[in-house]
Image (tube, rainbow, N blue to C red):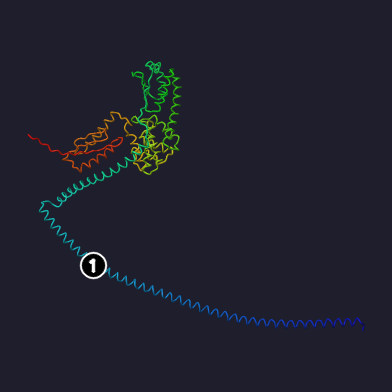
Amino acid sequence: MGPALYVMIGLALGVVLGFLVNRFLIAGKVNQARLAAERALTDAEKQAETTRKEMLLEAKDEIFHLKAQAEEEVKERRKELTVLENRLLQREESIERRAESVDKREHQLSSQVGQIAKRERDLEDAIAEEKSRLEATAGMTSDQAKAVLIERIKQDVTHDAAVLIRETEQRAREEADRKARNIIGIAIGRVAADHTAESTVSVVHIPSDDLKGRIIGREGRNIRAFEQLTGINLIIDDTPEAVILSSFDPVRREVGRITLENLIADGRIHPARIEEMFKKAEILVEQQIHEAGEQAVFDSGVHNLHNDLVRTLGRLRYRTSYGQNVLKHSLEVAHVAGVMASELGLDPTLAKRAGLLHDLGKAIDHEIEGPHAVIGADLARRLGENKEVVHCIEAHHGDVEPQTVEAVLVQAADAISAARPGARRETLESYIKRLEKLEALAESHKGVEKSYAMQAGREVRVMVKPDEISDADATVLARELAKQIEDELQYPGQIKVMIIRESRAVEYAK
């Protein structure tokens, strides 16, 4: 055997020996690992047992604690139930006592009802007996006695009512008059307006009567052209140095007046010149209308009015009512209504606006049928005016019933402005008719002997027959007559109604 063989054998033995040694070492490690695992398992079992015992103790403690707490809650609930039970028992006893009391009262009431029914029967028998005795004594039946009694009661009630009416009206009138005089005095004092009466000129003075022929023109061509253009009637009569203009439209009359005055000043009067002067007069009057409307709006402090409303206001410059210029009257009503609204704690802006526009319909009442209050309200409504202002306009003459305090204030301010001394003129014929109507209303009542209209129709004195009208009846008659005058007459301001009842005994010594 050679050395290589020995080497091969040595290597083989080395490999086998290394394998055996390695296997032995691995077996030792496995045994060690197994022993360590056994020890760890034993320790884990011990630890688990310890933990189980601790948790069991904790669970027992918790169960004990919960049991004690539950027992405590049960005790509390039992106490509460005991208290509630006691309360229920007490309430039941109280209800039983009340029921017994109610039964007793019911029994007493039943007894009292029976006694009352017996007394009623006894009373009815006594009344019937007394009624028969009274009828026999008085010689009247019950119906006759009832009629007499009703008449006496009626007289007593009428007298008491009249006394009460007189006293109540006197107190209310004194208080109302005092407050009204104060408010109206403040309003008029603060306004301090110019005198409102103003007449509209409808007569044009000419230098000489020779101009009348030139105004008429050859075969009347000038006057025809003038009347066709202006829409007014030109009256040329024997009045010296004067020509009369007649038209229902005050603006047309003003345009005609300016046209005629300019023609007279120019001296050239023929159809072409008349047309030229008429156009200039129209432009001038339209400008004056616009300026008058804007000035009125500025003077009254009313803003945001529609342009057509401003123009319509300006037309009132040429409108008069009983000689009173309507535009100045509207301004005065606006100021007075605004002051009275301020004194009463109301909105003065609304009152002034309604006062300024209240007579708006008079500017166009010759063009549209109907009362000027309704016409003005319709115009303001169409032009988008506030509904409260529209109501004040249509209610200021009673065409509709006033529904707001401002509407009543506009009525009052309108009456104040119209009734101021010298504010308006009235024709003699209408004045006499109003006085006659006033006296006729008074004399239409039963028991009136004579009536007299006094103080330019602001007072009526009624003489009554004393044997037909008592003092109480006189009070009632005064009230009824005042209400009838309010309903049937149109008048500025107020009318005082005075009933005079006088008894006289006359004898002559001979």
- Where 423 sits versus 402, above or below? above
Q: Quadrant of residue 247?
A: top left
Q: Nearer the viewer, residue 17 or 290?
A: 290
From this view, report whether residue 499 is shown above or below residue 242.
Answer: below
Residue drawn 28% across the image and 30% down it: 431
Q: Position of residue 471 (x, y in %)?
A: 19, 42
Dot 1: what SS?
A: helix
Image location (x, y in percent) of residue 261: 41, 21
Q: Position of residue 90 (x, y in %)?
A: 34, 72
Tell which of 459 and 439 is nearer to you.
Answer: 459
Assign the N terminus to one quadrant of the image.
bottom right
Side of 472 relative to 231 (left or right)? left
* Three-letter amino acid code of the residue under disc 1: Gln
Residue at the extreme right of the image, as rendered? 2
In the visual, does 441 lie left or right of 346?
left
Residue for badge 1: 108
CA neighbours of label 1 inside 10 A, class few (<14), some (14 to 19), many (20+): few
The picture places residue 192, in percent across and down from the top left corner, at 37, 34
Residue at image x 30%, y 71%? 97
The image quarter in which residue 456 lies: top left
Between 400 and 430, the residue placed more toward the observer is: 430
